[in-house]
Image (spheres, rainbow, N blue to C red):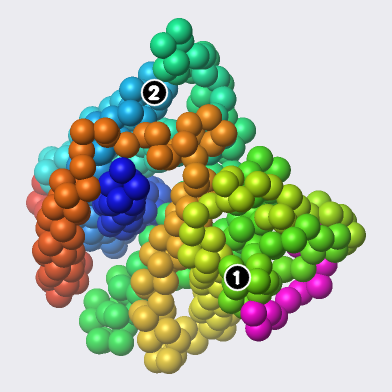
Amino acid sequence: MEIALQYDRLQFAVTATFHYLFPQLTMGLALFLLYFRTRDLLSGGDHFHEVARFWTGIFALSFAFGVVTGIPLEFQFGTNWAAFSNYAGGIIGQTLAMEGVFAFFLESSFLGVLLFGESRVSRRVLWVASAMLFAGAWLSGYFILATNAWMQHPVAYQVLDNGHLVVGSLWELLTNPWLFWEFSHTMTAAVATGSFVMAAVGALYLLADRHLAHAKTYVRTGVVAGALASILLITPTGHESARQVFEHQPIKGAAFEGLFRSERGADILLIGQPNLETMTIDNPLVVPSALSLLVYYDLYAKVKGLDAFPPHEWPDHIALLYFSYHIMAGLGTWLVVVMGLALLWLWRDRLFTSGWLLWLLLLSAPVPYIATTAGWMTAELGRQPWLVYGLFRTAEGISPLVHSGNTLFTLLGFLGLYLAMGLLFVLLVVEKLRQGPAEQVPVGRQIGK
């Protein structure tokens, strides 16, 4: 049973990680598409129409792969986590169903308008379609995060006679206090991903001396939005998310900060390696008393370490949790530095001719993907050993009739399939970038404003 549990967890981690590579880009790009369509509606020219059309194509590719990879992810609640689904299906089924409605109906319907009705409708209709696409993408994210927020901080539930849970108040479920900062931090990260991808594409075209007008728009938009999003990722959204963890999940906070012993005036570790045998940090570089100050706004406040809790309540992969958190935080700083430099050079009107900085923007495109992956690893590893924090343990949630060999077989199948899908996605994006933005406006585009 223990081996099956580890394979079930690993399979869900693999499928969730690969899936989230796609919606984080679409949720970020949805905001930019609305911005470009707004500029198109106000300007009356064709430039922003062409820009919006180009990024709608990138959005559509990412959306399609997100749908394909998201379906087996949700199926795993039944195939691999049947006991959990029986226990909490009356709650998570509500939010997952609403996510499906907005993702598959609202979002996909208006994406179809943008893709296939562009030459047949007016600018105003295209703007409305973009607004609804944005609403669908972000509402879809909201309901998925409402599911996760409930698992992190369960609220608004009732226990039936058979021990299963149902929703006590849908409004309280959707206004879970944990959800506000989780949603704001996650969506800000999605905007940062879209910003870095957009700036990287613009930098690529500038370095290749192609599509210069479009490239400058991509870089300018990506840098301005990326600088703002990168700052917001650190404060207030990242800071408040961390404080929320220390308030409601102090074991997770102590583990990802590497705080093995309770301390007054607790330090923040910038670097160091956790030693689980001695319960210390090797080769530490610290900021004195910074953790107490950031969590409790008091230099001498006591922060509970892992020693304040029974070991069977600790996360089971403390070292991986610690490194995931510090990778996320370190890369968050990198995002601020890169976009800060780019914004300064943009303000000085030197960015478009600074080859080294354009290369830096281009090579930094994968960084937000790595940072968000590390962030989700921090959130999910830190919740262990609970599926529903404080209520339902992970070991209790797996399907009793699905054995380790079955899970390993499907895990290997997913790895092979996702490798092929990843290569296909890269090839399609490369081909889209090779074609570049269209320079001509369809004839039907002249229908009206």
Q: Residues within 10 Å of mark 2 (few under 14, many from 20)?
A: many
Give the number of callouts: 2
Q: Secondary structure at mark 2?
A: helix
List the residue tagged with mark 1. Answer: 277
Is residue 300 visible in the rendered image? The answer is: yes
Q: Nearer the viewer, residue 27 or 326?
A: 326
Is residue 136 visible in the rendered image? The answer is: no
* Place of residue 140 in the rendered image (x, y in percent of width and height, measured from the top left): 36, 36
Q: Residues within 10 Å of mark 1 (few under 14, many from 20)?
A: few
* Place of residue 82 in the rendered image (x, y in percent of width and height, measured from the top left): 28, 30
Q: Secondary structure at mark 1?
A: loop
Residue at left offset 50%, top offset 46%:
384
- Amino acid type, mark 2: Tyr
Image vertical order of residue 201 relative to residue 291, above or below: below
Start-end of magenta stretch: 282-295
Question: Which image quarter holds the N terminus?
Answer: top left
Image vertical order of residue 115 relative to residue 232, above or below: above
* Place of residue 231 in the rendered image (x, y in percent of width and height, measured from the top left): 60, 63
Quarter occupied by residue 118: top left
Q: Nearer the viewer, residue 157 or 52?
A: 157
Q: Nearer the viewer, residue 93 or 199?
A: 93
**Residue 87 disc label:** 2
From the viewer's perspective, is 64 left or right of 18?
A: left
**Residue 232 disc label:** none
Which residue appears farthest toward the top when viewing the image? 161
Residue at left offset 58%, top offset 45%:
313
